[in-house]
Image (tube, rainbow, N blue to C red):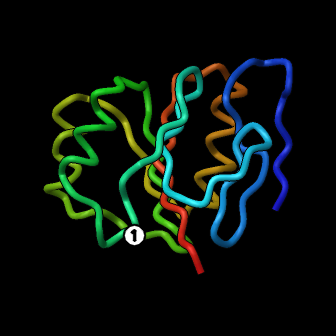
Amino acid sequence: MKLQSDPHSGANTITGYGDGYVEINKTPYNHAVLLSSDGNIEEWPVKSFDGLAAANFTQMAALKPELILIGTGNRQRFPRPELLKTLIEAKIGFEVMDSQAACRTYNILVGEGRRVLLALIVEVP
């Protein structure tokens, strides 16, 4: 699926998404990423939803976003409550959705000028 972005905004945007890849600023990635609207694109050491660990949530919280979108792969799944504890204690809002929906929502929030972090699991077929 191709997603449209505003090339004049200067923010990182999702320009495409499909099985086994996400395209950020027209560059494809075939691994999980942490993507902030105004910062770096980082490889996120998560191979699958079942591999989520407390350290992954600590890494997200350390970036101090306004909101975190967690894309859980091809379908929506909810992390165990003890994993979300770090975000709750840091008073960082979060939403959990399938990765495709997370990509669309991320672009909308970036367009609104929000400080959002996308934690995206890319499932390789």
**Between residues 73 and 66, which one lies in front from this camera angle?**
73
Q: Amino acid at mark 1?
A: Ser
Between 39 and 98, the residue placed more toward the observer is 39
Q: Which residue appears at 29% of the width and 32% of the height?
A: 61
Label count reads 1
95, above or below 87, in the image: below
Viewed as shown, does residue 11 lie left or right of 41? right
Camera-side residue: 44 or 60?
A: 44
Residue 27: image quadrant is top right
In percent of width and height, residue 69 lies at 48, 45
Quadrant in the picture for the C terminus: bottom right
Q: Is residue 124 above or below residue 119?
A: below
User: Given the current orientation, which residue lies at the most extreme bottom position?
Assistant: 125
Q: Quadrant of the N terminus?
A: bottom right
Q: What residue does disc 1 label?
A: 48
Locate residue 40, reporting x and y percent.
53, 27
Residue at the location (48% across, 38% down)?
42
Q: Is residue 45 above or below residue 67?
A: below
Which residue does the image show at 75% across and 37% down from the upper left? 25
Crowd rating for badge 1 (residues with CA inside 10 Å; few <14, some 14–19, many 20+): some
Viewer-proximal residue, 6 or 93? 6
The x, y position of residue 4, in whole percent, is 86, 42
Q: How far across and down, in percent of the image, does residue 124 sit?
A: 56, 74
Under circle 1, the secondary element is loop
Residue at the image position 43 percent from the left and 39 percent from the top: 68
Q: Using residue 100 as the reference point, say whether residue 80 is left or right of it.
A: left
